[in-house]
Structures are given as C-alpha cells and as structure tokens.
Image (cartoon, coloured by chain):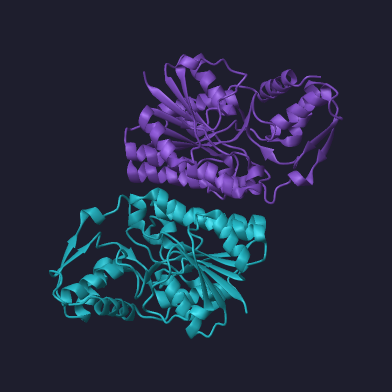
Chain colours: A purple, B cyan
C-alpha cells in the first residue's frame, strides 16, 4: 500500500483531507506529523490507518528520522502558521513555521532521495497588492508579498522551485486562496463572523459584530474543494508546477455578514476594530483557477452559501446557550 | 560619537570596511559581531575603536542582548554564507546563515525601536537566468533566483521590504555583484585563480588551472569600491531602496585567466572540473549602477587589472616557495 505523509495533520485542512481520502476510497497508509495529536471532531477517525508522530518540524533531526523511517510515496505539506494577522505580531515565528519547516522537509527528501512526490501549500497572499487589471489573478502574475506571512510563502515557493529544478525533486506548489469550512479556528475571518452570529443568536453576545477592515475583498474556497484539489495535484500536478486554488469569485467581509444576517434573520451592527487593521493590506484578491482546471479537471463545487451555512452550524453545535 | 554595528566583521568585506572608515576619517565607534575574532592581516587594527562580540546570529537571545547593550545608530549587515557552490551542497545552512540571521537582526531592531539605519547586503545572484535584452541589469528587472543562495538573498530582501514598509524600519538594500580583492577566500573564483597563478609561478603547482565553467560571465567590482558604496548608502540611501553595486562590465572566467597569464608571463592549461559545475547556472550577469550613481555619486574607481594584481600580490606574499 502506498504511503502518504501529512504534515500539520492536526489542523483544519488536515482533518478534512483525511476525511476526503476515506470518503473517496483512496487506499493509502496515512502517516501524520503535528505538534499535538489531532482532535478533529468533525471527521471520523480510524486509528489503524493513521500513524501519528508528535513533532516540531523545526527539529531537523526529528524530521529526518520520521521521513527515513516511513519512506512516504507522497508528502502533503500542510503544516504552517497561516495567519496574516499573527505574522505581523510575530514575524520570526511566522517565517520559521512556514519557510524553515518546509525547507527541513524537502531537504530531508533530497537526502533520502526516494522519489517522493511533495505538494507544497502556498497562499494567494503571495500576490500582494494587485490592481484591478490583474484580476482575476493567474499564476503568471508577479508576486509582491506585502506581509510577513506572504514573504514566508514566497520564500517557500522559491525554495520548492530550486529543489525541483536544481535537485530534481518531484514537488508541485499551490497558491491557495482563503479557506472556508467547519473546524477552522475563529482567528480566521469567516469562522470568526459565523461564530459571532451563533453567539448573538443564542444571546451570548450583543448584536455587534467585531471585525477588521470590512471592505477588503477575498476569494473564499470551501475546504472540501481545497482537499479534493490537493488530492488531484498529488496525482496529476506537474513537477515544478504552481497552481491557484480558488473560487474565482470575490466577496467582501461585509458581503459575508449580509449573507449570514439574511440567512439567519439576525440584524447586527458592525464595528471595525482598528486593532485588527493591518499595517499593509490587499484591498482585493480574486483568483483564476483555469490552470488547475485545464490540467486536472478540478473546479470548486460547494456554493459560498452552503459553505457559510456549514461554518455557522459548526459553531452553533459547539456553543452552549 | 555615533556607533556602527558590523555583523560578519571578521570576513573579507568587514576588514576592508573597517579599513575604509579609518582611511576616510569617519569618526564612528565600531562594534563588530562574528563567529570568530577577526584575523585580517591586510588592514591596520585599532582595538580601542572596535568592540567585538563572538556570536552566532542564529542565536536570537544573544543578538537581542548585543543590540540592546550597544544601541547602534548604523548596522551594516555583512554576515552571510555567500558561496553559491556551497549553497548547493548545504542549502539549509545557506538559508539559515543568510535569511534567518538577517531576520534575527532586523526583528531585534524592530523591538528595540531606536531608529537604527540598517544596510542589508544582497547579491546579483538574485536576478537569476537573464536574457541578453535584460543587460545591463537594472534594479527593476524581475528576480528569478536559480540557486539556494540566491533564494536566501531574495527572501532577505523581501523581509527587508516588509520591515521597511510595514514596520517603518530604516533599511536599505544592496544587490552586490561579484567581489574581487585581497583577502577573499580561495573558494571564490578570482581569488582561486590568482592563488593558482601564484602557486604555479613559484613551482608549487603544475601549470594547470582548475576551474568550474570558464565561459560564465560575471560583473566583478573591487572590494574597495564596494565598501565606499556601503558607506555612502548608510549615509544617503533611501529607506526601502534597493541598489546595484557593480562595475557595469562583464568578464568571463577565461578573461581573468588571460589577463593574469599575460600580466605575469605565465602560460597555463585550463581544466574545467565537472565537480565544480553547478546544477543550474547563470551564463551572463552584468549590472547597471546608474541608480546608486544618481543618488549618491558613487562609481567604481579601481580598474579590473589593478584589482586582479592586488589579489595576485596578496597570494604571492602568503605562499612560501
């Protein structure tokens, strides 16, 4: 049986990816690495198909020993510190826990030289401040990272390119746009807003929504669509290729609030907190998914409304009135 | 008296920079950091104007404590692992000892917030494979790093940009082209060739020159010109600015051999060693120094022939027949 190593398996996307492999009948032995044991409560979990290592990927000898012991055929590198807001507060941590951990993984693959296929997950933040003429963003558009997280991701992709072209590693890369789905932590905007709606609905919060900059526009893609894209790219992505994973549609933060407000009949006041406004921010990011569609057939399937509903319901279940 | 902190002071450029400050009558208190004590034998050394710390810049608490204790007005960040060849052998070390050490320095400056002006030294390797139409390279040309060292330098410059624009740090950056001058280690090409000529002249080596790819073309700038550029940029460079430091002239490795062969009347056979040929390499790099010239008045003053002569003489003195 082929083996897949998933770094950062305990996270939001890791849980959904494991769930996807099971539901899609993918017959793979799953090896997971994360700092802590997974505690997903939104996916079934079969311990016999999942071997788990608690490890910090900054610990290179540990990374080496795990990859040497398990010799994976595929590596899905999900481990990341993926919050832009946090990266402004702790830029060094963001860099270490994005770029450096990735370098430790791929340099180990280079040394072991077993031909493992690696999927490196990147971010739409890599594009930076874009003009309307650049939208929707295709992969050929210049990268101009404008926050510490984005710099870390650009650096990661540059390293991936060098390892693919210079050392012949079988790596391909994503630029994943904003995710949306049940289980995401509430430091991410959709999850934060849906949670606040659930709190307000239960009378646990005044009908005031606290957000950062409400006018920024992002391209949100449902996590179920994200994980199916990752699976397809592991199977069919081109060596050294870079692929947008996005919905192709831009939504402002205020759009999200309006949809949820209408969906659940909840009127709210919106308060933009200056503490949540970032030193530099991208006013508008929308992606183009033609490349991955043309090469693998992938396209997003989950509607934005269904996605928001699933996030709301996730919080609704977890918050006790 | 104003204070300048020089990281990597024990290196080739560090020695020349200290020498330059003295000869130019710059009245600065010099604080040096390096892994080992400087052992320059080509510059005078006045211990009373130089406080030295032995430290590894990967050790963040140590970096913090030194910068907090010394509160420099200027920081010249020379510390680097600047060999492309070594970066292919030990890419992780290259990344740590370029990008990560720089991040430790600037994040400390951000926390201390004393307004220090930082000069971040980068490399022409950041441009990568270029077409003839792009030559001479100006700072606006796209960066396409093609070796691990170059990726580390691009990442460093991206971080510098974020710290300048996002946190308001007073950083400016160089893209320094190949250096040439006495005291450079013989793992760098000009120094290696000049040393071999000196060895051959003394009968200590067969008249066979061992090199990598002889046809690659680089823009060599004398280290005396490099350090005067660094001093001018510390004084006059624009916050967030990026400046080429180069001669504007391309020379092939075989050109260097021909000049030295003629200068010292030494005939040699040339042997290109495949072990020294790199997985990916740039056939031709030549820079444009108009930007730094326009903004600071700098231009290179030392002729290539004088520069080669000084390197030959450096080795000639050090090699005993």
Please tell me whether residue A315 is drawn above or below residue A282 in the rendered image.
Answer: above
What residue do we see at 47% from left, 71% from top?
B289
Q: How many marks?
A: 0
What residue do we see at 38% from left, 39% from top?
A108
Left or right position of A312 against B34: right
Left or right position of B156 against B40: right
Q: Is residue B234 visible?
A: yes
Front-most of residues A130 and A205: A205
Instruction: State the image quarter where residue B136 is shown.
Output: bottom left
What residue do we see at 42% from left, 20% from top?
A29
Instruction: State the image quarter where residue B35 is shown.
Output: bottom left
Residue A177 coordinates in the image, percent (x, y):
59, 35
Left or right position of A169 against A47: left
Residue B186 coordinates in the image, percent (x, y):
29, 67
Residue A218 coordinates in the image, percent (x, y):
66, 37
Front-most of residues A299 and A11: A11
Residue B299 coordinates in the image, percent (x, y):
46, 78
Front-most of residues A308 and B107: B107
Q: Is residue A300 visible?
A: no
Which quarter of the figure is the C terminus of chain A placed in? top right
Instruction: State the image quarter where residue B110 is shown.
Output: bottom right
Which quarter of the figure is the N terminus of chain A placed in? top left
């Amino acid at each position: 049986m082929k083996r897949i190593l998933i770094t950062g398996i305990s996270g939001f996307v890791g849980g959904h990816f494991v769930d996807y492999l099971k539901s899609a009948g993918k017959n793979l032995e799953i090896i997971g690495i994360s700092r802590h044991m997974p505690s997903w409560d939104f996916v079934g979990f079969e311990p016999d198909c999942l071997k788990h290592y608690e490890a910090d990927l900054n610990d290179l000898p540990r990374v080496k020993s795990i990859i040497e012991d398990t010799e994976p055929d595929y590596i899905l590198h999900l481990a990341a510190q993926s919050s832009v807001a946090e990266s402004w507060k702790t830029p060094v941590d963001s860099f270490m826990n994005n770029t450096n951990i990735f370098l430790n993984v791929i340099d180990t693959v280079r040394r072991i030289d077993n031909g493992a296929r690696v999927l490196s997950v990147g971010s739409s933040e890599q594009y930076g401040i874009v003009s309307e003429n650049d939208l929707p963003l295709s992969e050929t558009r210049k990268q101009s990272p404008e926050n510490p997280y984005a710099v870390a991701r650009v650096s990661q992709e540059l390293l991936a390119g060098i390892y693919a072209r210079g050392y012949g590693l079988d790596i391909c890369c994503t630029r994943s746009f904003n995710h949306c789905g049940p289980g995401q932590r509430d430091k991410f905007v959709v999850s934060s807003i849906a949670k606040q709606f659930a709190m307000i609905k239960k009378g646990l919060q005044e009908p005031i929504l606290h957000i950062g900059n409400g006018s920024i526009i992002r391209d949100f893609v449902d996590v179920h669509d994200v994980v199916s894209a990752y699976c397809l790219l592991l199977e069919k992505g081109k060596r050294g290729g870079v692929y947008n994973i996005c919905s192709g549609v831009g939504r402002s933060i205020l759009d999200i609030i309006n949809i949820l407000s209408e969906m659940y009949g909840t009127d709210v006041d919106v308060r933009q907190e200056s503490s949540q406004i970032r030193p530099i921010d991208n006013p508008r990011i929308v992606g183009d998914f033609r490349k991955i569609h043309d090469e693998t057939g992938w396209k997003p399937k989950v509607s934005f409304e269904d996605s928001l509903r699933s996030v709301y319901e996730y919080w609704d279940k977890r918050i006790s009135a």
